[in-house]
Amino acid sequence: MAPWPQLLLLLGLLPAAAPASSKPRAAGAQAWELASPELREPVRFALEMYNRGRAAGTRAALEAVRGRVRRAGRGSLYSLKATLVEPPCNDPTVCQLPVSKKTLLCSFEVLDELGKHMLLRRDCGPVDTKSTDDKNETFSSFLPLLNKDPLPQDFSVKMASIFKDFVTTYNRTYDSKEEASWRMSVFASNMVRAQKIQALDRGTAQYGVTKFSDLTEEEFRTVYLNPLLKDAPGRSRRPAPPVNGAPPPRWDWRDKGAVTDVKDQGMCGSCWAFSVTGNVEGQWFLRRGTLLSLSEQELLDCDKTDKACLGGLPSNAYSAIRNLGGLETEDDYSYRGRLQTCSFSAEKAKVYINDSVELSKNEQKLAAWLAKNGPISVAINAFGMQFYRHGISHPLRPLCSPWLIDHAVLLVGYGNRSATPFWAIKNSWGTDWGEEGYYYLHRGSGACGVNIMASSAVID
């Protein structure tokens, strides 16, 4: 089986002598040797965070590290794999029994934005023990690791061909042979994972190549998703008055003119802002008869409770809109996909809200409320969405826990396809993802926590 770089050369993905770029990329990833100078500060920061609160003599030391960087806007996201050694513990006031030194394998995600570091993720475990991530523990029990699965002998050749098509379709460029080879190996691993997700899905969804197929799971989750949704309760809101009667058998606000075109949040975890503006756009249309595309960038810059591209909560965003005095339009306050200085102008605000409400967790009642009152802001577990292409997604509940929601979206309708009930969901990853930017999720089973965090603005 030919190695990845040779296959890339044979298929024309790299020139015969492609020199590594000496300049940092605006977006992308680069792998380094252990002593890369650019790794020193994020590694030092990660080690400092690991040792915080530890007494002298008990702090871990760095043994080895490898890393990659992905650049987004004014920031750099470092993915680090480090081996740490904790010293022996012989102090009877600290440990009851003498303990020999312990070697740990750690994964860190460190964001460097304008020289300021932030630790986004830390997972450590003994090197001789299988370490698990609480988000992936049940997933791993269903899906064996790639290197444990027998693969066809021509797997590499076929995968290289598919990868070449992916590079062409999504206009990918890589700075060096090493990076292209690394991205191809990530792509191959992702294709195997997508096939396994496909085999376990109980709906009609098809999974496979998407524009996110050359990203690791950690990169995708850190850059495009919103970890704050599962960790923070947000502001409490009053419950919405219930809607009496059964909902219509199907409904779609796209057909009624209440939904703007699909937008693209880019390399920024700003889904919370897009979910809320989508809801407010629909509410304003129903109350005033005018559909306006509203500014997500205003929320990124001016909502001081949420964390812009690092995530946020719809409940906080509603409060920010009220406190600011409204929302400007997309035309007046355009999207940049990174945190900027707030430049909101009350004179330019075209839309206001009076309040926000929390909706029922009963999906039948949610459908009735949507049909009467407009699109709904919801949050879901984005399991499998990295590879979603089309159809109705219905993952096994252990794989798509409702308690691990990490992505905010907009319910715009519901119905049935060949007797399979679905929610029609407007996403914010552009029209070159999913069904022209839309995601379809099984309705009636609480799939992926779609009913856990439903809310809406109120406009009098």
Image (cartoon, rainbow, N blue to C red):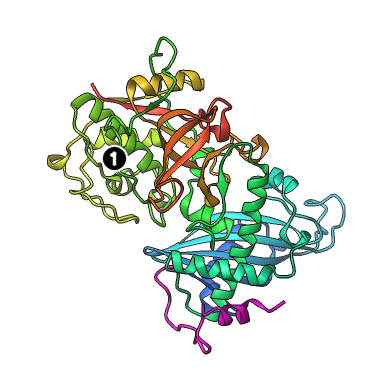
Can you say which quadrant of the picture contains the C terminus?
A: top left
Q: Residue at x 45, y 22 (%)?
A: 366
Q: Residue furthest front?
A: 418
Q: Is residue 97 left or right of residue 4?
A: right
Q: Is residue 8 magenta?
A: yes
Judge the density around disc 1: few (<14), some (14-19), many (≥20) Cα neighbours within 10 Å.
Answer: some
Nearest to the observer: residue 321 or residue 272: 272
Q: Residue at x 51, y 77 (%)?
A: 13
Looking at the image, can residue 67 be seen? Answer: no
Nearest to the observer: residue 48 or residue 204: 204
Which residue position holds label 1?
Answer: 260
Q: Is residue 439 magenta?
A: no
How far from the left and from the top, in percent, is residue 458? 30, 24
Please tell me whether mark 1 sits on a helix, a strand or a loop.
loop
Predominant SS along the magenta part: loop
Looking at the image, can residue 243 be seen? Answer: yes
How far from the left and from the top, in percent, is residue 340? 29, 55
Q: Is residue 100 left or right of residue 267?
A: right
Nearest to the observer: residue 59 or residue 445: 445
How far from the left and from the top, in percent, is residue 216? 57, 60
Can you say which quadrant of the picture contains the N terminus?
A: bottom right
Q: Is residue 99 above or below residue 32?
A: above
Q: Is residue 183 above or below residue 218?
A: below
Number of dots carrying numbers: 1
- Please provide the residue range marked out in magenta: 1-27
Residue 209 figure quarter: bottom right
How far from the left and from the top, in percent, is residue 26? 39, 70
